[in-house]
Image (cartoon, rainbow, N blue to C red):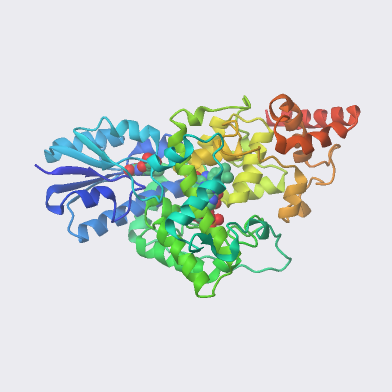
Amino acid sequence: MPTLVPILGDQLSHSLAALRAVPKSDAVILMMEVAEEATYVPHHPQKIALFFSAMRHFAEELRQAGWRVDYVPLDDPANTGSLSGEVTRAATRHGTARTLAVKAGEWRVLTAQQHWPNVTLLDDDRFLCSIDQFAAWAGPRKRLIMEDFYRIMRRQTGLLMDGDQPIGGQWNFDTENRKSVPKGQRFTPPIRFAPDAITAEVLALVNARFHNHFGTTASFAWPVTRTQALAALDDFITHRLAGFGDYQDAMVTGEDVLNHSLLSPAINLGLLGPLEVARAAEAAYQAGHAPLNAVEGFIRQIIGWREYVRGLYWFAGPDYTARNHLAATRPLPALFWGTPTGLKCLAEAVSATGRNAMAHHIQRLMILGNFAMLTGTDPSQVHRWYLAVYADAIEWVEAPNVIGMSQFADGGLMATKPYAAGGAYVNRMSDHCKACRYDVKQRTGPKACPLNSLYWDFLARHEEVLSSNQRLWRIYDGWRRFAPDEQQRIRTQAAHFLATLA
Ligand code: FAD
Ligand code: DLZ
């Protein structure tokens, strides 16, 4: 009797543990497009299309490699609409004796997998740090400092190492990576992959079924195969890696990509492995094609942040997404779904998200996340929004970034202080304020940038919880130096703005 091998939409790796564990002659591979996965949050249509297209291409590649593949498309009339429904149906259809699968990247799906018929679940070994290794590191620690973890990953992989010491004599070159973009700076646009017949069919299906979800598929150009993903990696290494460090935190109106890699969807779906991506960057440094600050910064994102958030997600447990340290209860403001806003920085970030199912890190953290936190928005609603709208969003990576890093909802497990900022930060790191209807220099009055009063109001609201945080002492000193009537004016200004969000 054959073994049923279900492969999920983010498990599209030819070296997947389940494919290594069973001979081709004994296996029926099951891949399934299901309505539940597309709608448990209202995913951006471009994200659904990316998953379905990459899944269909992967199934084709497996068939060509000699695997027996059963692919259930979304519009199969017998499709039950859920992963578990399809696994049960397939087990009966093929008369399989057992099910062999790789553990999913999300508590919700992992729980469902545990009830699949006669199932054996394998660890997902496409990461540099196993869940057990992370737990052994994190268990005895009070604070989970990413930089400490990152150094272990550097030593473990040997990336940018000279024996036991970091190349260049420093582990981290972040201080060199906060430049704002000079006027007239040009960026090479990323390679685009025109939809082939498979993608075109998927786009038609998705546009018909999910047109009521936020976002558009018009700009779809994602790599959907490993060959294309390798071309995207090469394009980044050749054209953008050298400038990656300098403008890593910058934002420019009309520049959606800058020097970012756009590789997260391909890595998260399994089309690229994290180590090969990091090694490609290291090779560019060794060949003299990119400076150390850029290459170190990029490698840190992949072997540091990416592995760290994955470890933290599983370490923190299934209730992590419900954490709400600051007791924030505001419903998600409508501007997140595209309702017009006068704040240019937010309008840019939301518009990029709708067009591309993508926004870069600083837009996600310091524009959208910052606004949600300052306005006291319920973190679980914020989490569901991020999970829905980004092409690279899978819960293991999205949730720590949102709940922990951007909303401080885990009470500091991940971030040592809230990433809160007023208009001055946005003005320093972007050109948005020049074209904004608000005045970034003003705290109060009809033209004042709302971020300024919201920032101080946020700190004042949470003074009891946050003012004991040593990293915020200087800021709270600043707040206390305002005269009481100025404090009152700021808080009234914030209250008026918050009332407009209701
Ligand atoms: P680059 O800037 O080119 O970075 C290179 C790679 O490093 C990325 O492709 C990614 O694989 C990795 N990386 C960088 N930062 C992080 C990080 N903080 N956590 C994990 N990996 C990282 N990333 C996701 O992959 N999925 C998400 O759902 C996601 N949600 C986020 C939500 C918030 C609030 C924030 C602040 C960050 C989030 N990130 C997420 C991290 C980061 O913003 C994206 O990985 C990045 O913007 C993807 O674009 P890129 O490939 O051009 O990245
Ligand atoms: C995100 C997604 C979507 C939109 N659709 C599917 C699908 O139809 N079939 C599937 O196997 N996976 C899909 N995924 C990914 C899963 O929702 C899930 O997030 C990951 O497998 C991580 O557990």
Q: Position of residue 502 (x, y in %)?
A: 67, 28
Quadrant containing the N terminus is top left
Q: Position of residue 440 (x, y in %)?
A: 80, 46
Q: Is residue 355 visible?
A: no
Considering depth in this image, is 133 or 393 the residue closer to the camera?
133
Q: Residue at x 55, y 34 (%)?
A: 142
**Compared to 147, does 199 lie above or below?**
below
Q: Is residue 421 visible?
A: yes
**Residue 193 in the image, given as x and y percentages of width and height:** 43, 64
Is residue 135 rendered to the left or right of residue 214? left
Compared to residue 260, the image places residue 501 above or below, namely above
Q: Residue at x 55, y 31 (%)?
A: 381
Residue at the location (35% across, 54% down)?
Answer: 54
Report the side of 171 relative to 95 (left or right).
right
Q: How many labels, in total?
A: 0
Say left or right for 72 vs 315: left
* Residue 207 locus on image (x, y percent): 42, 47
In the current view of this chain or complex, which residue is farthest to the left?
1
The residue furthest front is 164
Frontmost residue, 401 versus 383: 401
